[in-house]
Image (tube, coloured by chain):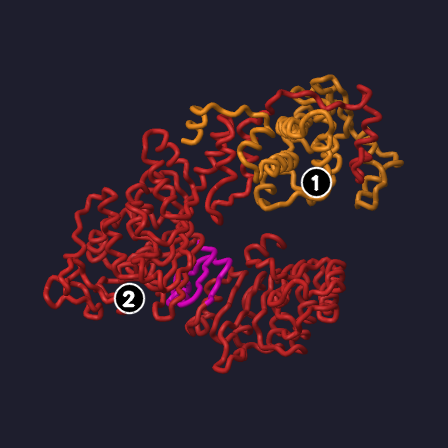
Chain colours: A orange, B red
């Protein structure tokens, strides 16, 4: 499970504090079971889940770990990627995950790990890349994960820039507007 | 998962333990992936805004033209921050905001307007459209540098008074106003009044009649025959070689009725403009070559600043046209935190001593001795200054540094002596010992230090650097000249001293050495590796980093 993965002793990445708890007799880390719209089930530790403001608020409201929680509007694929992102960044103090910090660091660049994360979405076979990017962006938006929203919207912007209109339409599978519609847009 | 990271392991482990079993498969989605408007807005925020530097706004405009669902979010950003870089674009803009209800809505959306043009004569009646920008908060005009031959061809390079007056009187939310020098030639101010009249203001002004009587003799107008038209071709002949500083006998200090009369002659409502200035949080004004009426207007702005003001910038790059700060009508400026005076600005220091604002950052980059004489009372009047920039041409001596011994520790300090002596050598300023004394007494809080232009020998400079390492452990950015400037390359020997410095200043992230005079390739590979090892950036010729960029990047 993800929470167990987080307990791995990973001192190379400065994460040994958590790792030291692995065999201790402290109370077990709280877990949250999530079921996606396409009926996939994931179990994550509370710290990972709390990267999502949606889950954080929910956990505060319920004052404890609720029964398996159904996450509407999020597919299994998207949730898996989201958990991958949150598992990495929940201990990363250098990566802001609140809107204020993100606003104050406008010229922030995409980090190395994030770049690989996005590239892996791109390399996924099956659907066009942009579909996965958009789907993940919407899921991050629904679960309110500011850091991931920033990363995904920035990646989509990078996909658009500096392409001509025709190419952007092709990427997003937008039909070419009629002459009259184009005139309206131009106006 | 192929990701070579802990997260990849985490994900892989998770895959194996999914309760649902098996691997997730990317789902088939709708043929045209759609993002909600809020997310589209964020995507467009991530698009580079190339409008200010290139001849178009292709990225955002492309996005606006993709489809109907994208258009509102992209247009919103285009309209929220308007950048106009040519008279043609200004004309297109004014046309697009004056054509009906939707155009008025668009105009009201504008929050920031950046104007980067120099030929205001090519822009007709912009002042007449300003009232449509009801929601405008920031107005910034920039003048591109122009050469002297074009200066003769074009009568105006600055912003007409009418435009600024209209902004201040008809944009109730305007908070920041950055304006450059108003005019270059005397004929310029005539078009100010023309702009007002064309713009529909209710004042009927005959500029020629009003001002002909006021024209001072030093304007060489050939008006001996009474009609100012010596060759009878219908044009008034003006000798362009005259001193452009025409004295129109305007009361520059401005009081009461004379102000009202001058404002009327220029076609604006004085009270409304004064109210508008009183609301400003940011004001930046350039002095320099301009007419008397422009100077009067500039003084009017400075006299009328009010309590909301947070940031004030003054600059004048012409020695003969000193920008004099007039007495403020405000009793106090309780929010003024930043004052930046560059070039030929005078009377600023007494003004600050009188008003005692809670300054945080002060730049005195001028050539006037009054700052030196009054620095002590100024520091006493404004003990909150934590960021001091004395990039001045007057002497920064050990006595200047001793004044800082009694001031609370600074977090940022720039000491640059800009003037060189008669034979090209640097003027002797503060000594290495004097600077080290300052560091020991008040150097503990420094995070930014710029001592690039000093007269130290190599040994003295290295002694200072060693002292910085002992005293300023919070330093993040250091700007200093390279020991032995004449070297054609920067090798390990030249940067070795940084290792000791880094030990004393563990969070030091950037050191600017004067290698920007050379090509990047002059930094040896060995030196690069060394700098990478101690995690220190140095400046490169391609960087051209300003203070703001450095602060943003490394602080």
Question: Where does label 1 land, which residue?
Answer: A115
Residue drawn at the location 59% of the way across and 46% of the way down: A107
Asked if residue B420 is among those painted magenta in the image, a careful observer would answer: no
- On the image, the x and y values in percent for residue A48 come to 74, 32
Q: Is residue A181 left or right of residue B205?
A: right
Q: Which residues are magenta?
A: B336-365
SS under mark 2? loop
In the picture, the disc for residue B161 is none
In the picture, the disc for residue B244 is 2
Task: Measure the C-alpha gap from mark 2 to mark 1.
Answer: 58 Å
Asked if residue B362 is among those painted magenta in the image, a careful observer would answer: yes
Q: Is residue B419 left or right of residue B488?
A: left
Sort mark 2 into few (<14), some (14-19) or many (20+) by Cα contacts within 10 Å: some
Q: Chain of mark 2?
A: B
The answer to which quarter of the image holds residue A27 is top right
The answer to which quarter of the image holds residue A31 is top right
- On the image, the x and y values in percent for residue A91 come to 74, 40
- Residue B217 in sight from this viewpoint: yes
Q: Residue furthest left?
A: B225
Please, is residue B417 above or below residue B90 in the view?
Answer: below
SS under mark 1? helix
| Viewer-side residue, A12 vs B350 | A12
């Amino acid at each position: 499970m993800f929470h167990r993965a987080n307990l791995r002793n990973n001192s190379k990445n400065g994460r040994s504090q958590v790792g030291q708890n692995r065999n201790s007799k402290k109370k077990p880390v709280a877990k949250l079971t999530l079921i996606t719209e396409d009926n996939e089930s994931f179990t994550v530790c509370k710290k990972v889940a709390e990267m999502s403001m949606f889950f954080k608020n929910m956990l505060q409201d319920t004052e404890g770990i609720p029964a398996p929680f159904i996450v509407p509007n999020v597919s299994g694929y998207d949730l898996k990627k989201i958990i991958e992102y949150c598992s990495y960044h929940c201990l990363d103090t250098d990566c802001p995950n609140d809107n204020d910090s993100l606003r104050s660091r406008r010229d922030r660049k995409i980090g190395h790990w994030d770049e690989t994360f996005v590239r892996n979405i791109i390399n996924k076979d099956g659907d066009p890349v942009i579909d996965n990017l958009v789907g993940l962006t919407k899921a991050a938006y629904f679960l309110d994960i500011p850091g991931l929203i920033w990363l995904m919207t920035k990646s989509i912007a990078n996909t658009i820039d500096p392409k001509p209109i025709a190419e952007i339409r092709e990427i997003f599978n937008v039909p070419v507007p009629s002459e009259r519609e184009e005139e309206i847009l131009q106006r | 998962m192929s990701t070579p990271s802990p997260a990849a392991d985490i994900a892989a482990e998770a895959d194996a333990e999914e309760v649902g079993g098996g691997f997730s498969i990317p789902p088939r989605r709708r043929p045209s992936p759609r993002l909600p408007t809020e997310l589209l807005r964020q995507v467009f925020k991530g698009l580079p805004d190339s409008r200010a530097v290139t001849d178009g706004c292709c990225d955002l405009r492309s996005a606006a033209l993709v489809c109907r669902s994208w258009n509102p979010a992209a247009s919103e950003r285009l309209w929220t921050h308007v950048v106009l870089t040519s008279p043609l674009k200004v004309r297109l803009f004014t046309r697009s905001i004056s054509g009906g209800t939707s155009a008025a809505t668009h105009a009201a959306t504008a929050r920031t307007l950046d104007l980067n043009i120099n030929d205001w004569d090519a822009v007709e009646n912009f002042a007449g459209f300003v009232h449509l920008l009801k929601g405008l908060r920031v107005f910034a005009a920039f003048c591109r540098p122009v050469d002297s031959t074009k200066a003769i061809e074009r009568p105006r390079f600055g912003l007409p008074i009418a435009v600024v007056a209209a902004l201040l009187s008809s944009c109730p939310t305007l908070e920041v106003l950055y304006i450059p020098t108003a005019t270059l030639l005397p004929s310029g101010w005539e078009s100010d009044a023309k702009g007002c009249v064309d713009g529909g203001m209710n004042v009927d002004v005959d500029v020629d009649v009003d001002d002909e009587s006021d024209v001072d003799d030093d304007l060489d107008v050939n008006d001996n025959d009474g009609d100012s038209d010596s060759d009878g071709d219908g044009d008034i002949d003006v000798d362009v070689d005259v001193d452009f500083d025409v004295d129109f006998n305007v009361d520059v200090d401005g009081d009461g009725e004379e102000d009202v009369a001058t404002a009327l002659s220029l076609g604006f409502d004085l009270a409304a403009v004064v109210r508008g200035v009183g609301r400003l949080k940011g004001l930046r004004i350039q002095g320099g070559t301009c007419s008397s009426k422009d100077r009067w207007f500039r003084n009017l702005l400075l006299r009328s600043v009010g309590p909301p003001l947070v940031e004030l910038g003054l600059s004048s790059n012409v020695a003969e046209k000193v920008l004099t700060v007039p007495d403020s009508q405000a009793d106090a400026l309780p929010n003024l935190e930043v004052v930046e005076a560059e070039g030929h600005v005078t009377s600023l220091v007494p003004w600050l001593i009188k008003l005692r604002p809670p300054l945080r950052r002060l730049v005195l980059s001028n050539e006037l001795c009054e700052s030196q004489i009054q620095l002590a009372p100024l520091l006493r009047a404004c003990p909150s200054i934590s960021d001091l920039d004395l990039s001045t041409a007057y002497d920064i001596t050990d006595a200047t540094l001793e004044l800082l011994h009694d001031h609370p520790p600074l977090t940022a300090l720039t000491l640059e002596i800009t003037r060189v002596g008669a034979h090209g050598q640097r003027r002797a300023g503060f000594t290495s010992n004097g600077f080290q004394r300052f560091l020991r007494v008040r150097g503990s809080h420094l995070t930014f230090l710029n001592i690039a232009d000093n007269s130290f020998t190599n040994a003295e400079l290295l002694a200072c650097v060693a002292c910085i390492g002992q005293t300023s452990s919070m330093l993040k950015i250091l700007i200093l000249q390279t020991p032995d400037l004449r070297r054609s390359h920067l090798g390990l020997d030249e940067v070795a001293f940084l290792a000791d410095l880094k030990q004393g200043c563990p969070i030091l992230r950037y050191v600017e050495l004067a290698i920007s005079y050379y090509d990047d390739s002059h930094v040896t590979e060995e030196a690069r590796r060394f700098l990478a090892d101690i995690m220190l950036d140095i400046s490169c010729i391609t960087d051209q980093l300003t203070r703001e960029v450095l602060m943003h990047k490394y602080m």
